[in-house]
Image (cartoon, grey):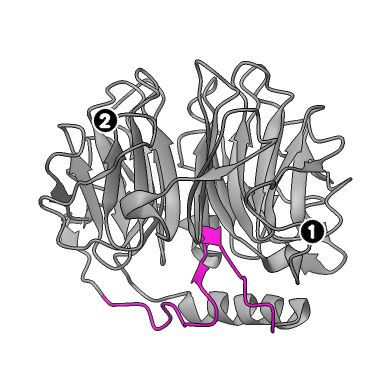
């Protein structure tokens, strides 16, 4: 049978954003206080059902191989793909993953053939062989009869059998590589929706959780949590559980007292492990931040994915410069820095596909999702 090569055509999603509720499945942010929680969950489930089967160039998650820069995993609104040639061609995963909608991807930094996929209401899937086969790993990752929408998966850097998941029904932890999950929400009394997680690389028992009501911190590996939203969410805020969506978190690898939080209403910075937060003013003051990345070789260099551009700072957030040369689509959904070369970045857009920069964001080139059959 002769192989055929095809390029995916763009079809815009039927659902984008409303003025009352912003929904990005890979960074779920629901903050309209007029919506009861059960209605929000129902709306999420409906959106997941409507979205399945559509073909789209909306890139919801990017995962880069920790040592092989040519290998990229990609989740769009309709499928999961892998490239082994730095994005020139792609294979689309079939089998188990075609039954669900993937909104987050994560590669085990130690066993790099192991890939996790977080789904929209179907728990987690795990591949032990670089995506060739997938197995559902969702035992316990739910609340009652409500299945979890898995927004992010992170690994403990000192033992990757310990995995954490940020979901719409809380934080979950697995001690056996995802085979079983246990809810870890002690102290998170006001919130259920957990959007993002970040582990302190120097002290992996310290973890930050971004929720729809600000930031929480654990100092004992998720056994218990404390709210750490001073300067971010007012103590007397009405509907505190929906006061501020925190879509992304980053801990400085050289000075873990410094933490950044990208939110639905701008970027915040803490210099005391989250005890106090200050909003970064200027050109990004009230930007919707969907992702934040820190240059691992130069932590004072930060990149933001926002609703209208990529922003870069080279002075720890004091000043920002838009980096949009070559970006035909500027609503940015996902952002990753190559582990092997901090000058190489990838961004996924809302409806405009995937872009790569090889010069630290100075220019961007679109990478079409050209699909080739799996050999």
> In this figure, what is the number of numbered marks?
2
User: Picture coordinates of residue 346 (x, y %)?
Assistant: 28, 42
- For label 2, the SS is loop
User: Picture coordinates of residue 230 (x, y %)?
Assistant: 69, 46
Residue 317: image quadrant is top left
31 relative to 280 in the view: left or right: right
| Image point (33%, 72%), residue name | 55
Q: Report the front residue among 170 and 66.
A: 170
Residue 92 seen in render: no
Q: Main secondary structure of the magenta part?
A: loop
Q: Report the front residue among 67 and 278.
A: 278
Residue 217 seen in render: yes
Start-end of magenta stretch: 11-34
Instruction: List the residue tagged with mark 2.
Output: 70
281 relative to 349 in the view: left or right: right
| Image point (41%, 66%), residue name | 77
Label 2 to label 1: alpha-carbon separation:
35 Å
| Image point (62%, 16%), residue name | 202
Locate the N terminus and report the quarter of the image it occupies.
Answer: bottom left
Residue 142 badge = 1
Residue 57 badge = none
Q: With respect to residue 79, does 226 lie above or below?
A: above
User: Picture coordinates of residue 134 (x, y %)?
Assistant: 56, 46
Residue 340 within the magenta-colored segment of the rendering:
no
């Amino acid at each position: 049978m002769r192989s055929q090569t095809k390029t995916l055509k763009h079809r815009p999603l039927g659902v984008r954003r409303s003025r009352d509720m912003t929904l990005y499945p890979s960074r779920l942010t629901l903050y309209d206080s007029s919506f009861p929680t059960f209605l929000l969950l129902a709306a999420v489930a409906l959106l997941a059902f409507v979205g399945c089967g559509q073909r789209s160039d909306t890139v919801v998650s990017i995962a880069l191989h920790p040592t092989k820069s040519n290998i990229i995993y990609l989740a769009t609104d309709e499928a999961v793909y892998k490239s082994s040639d730095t994005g020139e061609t792609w294979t689309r995963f079939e089998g188990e993953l075609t039954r669900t909608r993937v909104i987050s991807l994560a590669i085990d930094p130690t066993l790099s053939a192991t890939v996790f996929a977080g789904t929209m209401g179907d728990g987690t899937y795990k591949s032990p062989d670089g995506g060739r086969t997938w197995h559902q790993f969702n035992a316990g990752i739910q609340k009652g009869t409500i299945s979890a929408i898995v927004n992010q998966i992170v690994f403990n850097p000192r033992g990757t059998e310990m995995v954490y998941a940020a979901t719409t029904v809380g934080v979950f932890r697995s001690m056996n590589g995802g085979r079983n999950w246990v809810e870890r929400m002690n102290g998170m009394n006001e919130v259920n929706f957990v959007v993002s997680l970040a582990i302190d690389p120097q002290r992996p028992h310290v973890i930050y959780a971004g929720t729809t009501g600000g930031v929480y911190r654990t100092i004992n590996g998720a056994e218990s949590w404390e709210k750490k939203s001073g300067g971010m969410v007012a103590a007397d805020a009405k509907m505190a559980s929906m006061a501020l969506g925190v879509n992304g978190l980053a801990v400085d690898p050289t000075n873990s007292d410094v933490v950044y939080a990208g939110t639905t209403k701008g970027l915040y910075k803490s210099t005391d492990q989250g005890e106090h937060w200050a909003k970064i003013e200027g050109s990004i003051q009230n930007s919707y931040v969907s992702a934040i990345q820190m240059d691992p070789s130069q932590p004072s260099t930060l990149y933001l994915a926002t609703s209208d551009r990529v922003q870069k700072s080279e002075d720890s957030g004091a000043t920002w410069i838009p980096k949009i040369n070559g970006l035909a689509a500027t609503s940015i959904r996902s952002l990753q820095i190559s582990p092997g070369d901090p000058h190489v970045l990838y961004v996924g857009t809302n409806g405009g596909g995937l872009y790569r920069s090889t010069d630290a964001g100075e220019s961007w080139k679109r990478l079409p999702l050209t699909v080739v059959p799996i050999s």
